[in-house]
Image (spheres, rainbow, N blue to C red):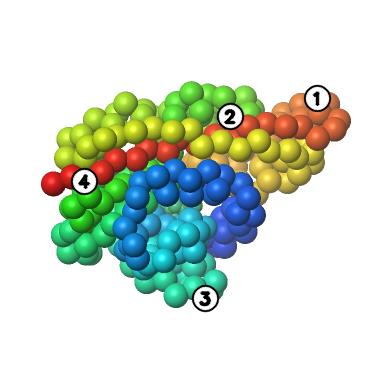
Amino acid sequence: MKVNYNSRYAGKYDQIWDLPESLFQPQLRLVLQKLEIKHKPRILDVGCGAGHHTLFLENSFDGETIGLDTSIGMLKQIQKKGAEIKLLRACGENIPLMNNVVNLVFISYVLHQSEEKEKLISEAYRVLKRNGHTAILTSSHNQLRSDLVHQYFPRILEINLKRFPPLDEIKEMLNRAGFKNVSFSEISVKQEASAEEIIERIKGKPMSVFNLLSEEEFQSGLRSFIKNLRSKYKDKLTYKDSSSLITANKLA
Ligand SMILES: C[S@@+](CC[C@H](N)C(=O)[O-])C[C@H]1O[C@@H](n2cnc3c(N)ncnc32)[C@H](O)[C@@H]1O
């Protein structure tokens, strides 16, 4: 169930998720600030994608940010933005960095795509300096279940429940790797959009999981989605977009 972030999809992904900073980044910044990340930290963004968080991290901390991703298409999207960010084309399960060199390893919506999650987490531990932190952004199973999209694309929920590790499992993997002080927070933002705006967004397959459906299956889900949304929501609808942030640190 591997998603192919080729150049075509990378460009599209970048466009769809190039949302204003106002979304949940202020909340994310608050949580990260509480971690007491050292002055001029070195930050590694594993599975940085098109760089939305990489650029946010670069602008939030006065240090060095490194983006790492397996997809050349995604890394090219960051390059186009012209920011001075060091980029590594590599797997999170085999990070081409020495031991104990990074202050924060950020992993946003990558763990569910890794076929060796335990290895990825232990690599994050290895490259972290003593007193370094990891911050993992993901969706809990409850968050996946409450996503509006899943009501119309039930197989997406089925696929995602298999791909996304439950939060308890992530905590166990972090503990096994040696991490301490594992803590969870919900990062959420209230969104408002018209039915037509949401329909346009779904047509663009905003989540990689859509690419795991056959085109027929996608079109059939889309038809019922459009029909129901248009009949139920004449005005703007408000909904909550939530993610789970897990932080932990390396003491020894
Ligand atoms: C859903 S995107 C998330 C991108 C970005 N972190 C964000 O939150 O916007 C997942 C990204 O992880 C990358 N990826 C998937 N598996 C990976 C792995 N094992 N090592 C490094 N990158 C990986 C994909 O190429 C893709 O760019």
Q: Nearer the viewer, mark 3 or mark 2?
A: 3
One can see residue 202 in this view: yes
Amino acid carrying mark 2 in the image: Asp
In the rendered structure, find residue 147 and report the number of the disc placed on it. Answer: 2
Q: Which residue position is annotated with label 3?
A: 82
Examine the rendered structure and indicate whether residue 31 appears above or below residue 238. Answer: below
Q: Which residue position is annotated with label 4?
A: 250
Assign the N terminus to one quadrant of the image.
top left
Q: To which quarter of the image does residue 68 belong?
A: bottom left
Q: Position of residue 203 (x, y in %)?
A: 68, 45
Q: Which residue occupies the extreme left position in the image?
A: 252
* Front-most of residues 174 and 158: 174
* Front-most of residues 211 and 231: 231
Q: Which residue position is annotated with label 1?
A: 232
Distance Cα–Cα, label 1 vs label 2? 17 Å
**First-in-chain label (1 vs 2):** 2
**First-in-chain label (3 vs 4):** 3
Asked if the residue at label 4 sits under 8 Å from ligand 1, the reply is: no
**First-in-chain label (4 vs 1):** 1
Check disc 3 and report its element: helix, strand or loop. Answer: loop
Asked if the residue at label 1 sits under 8 Å from ligand 1, the reply is: no
* Front-most of residues 42 and 215: 42
**First-in-chain label (2 vs 4):** 2
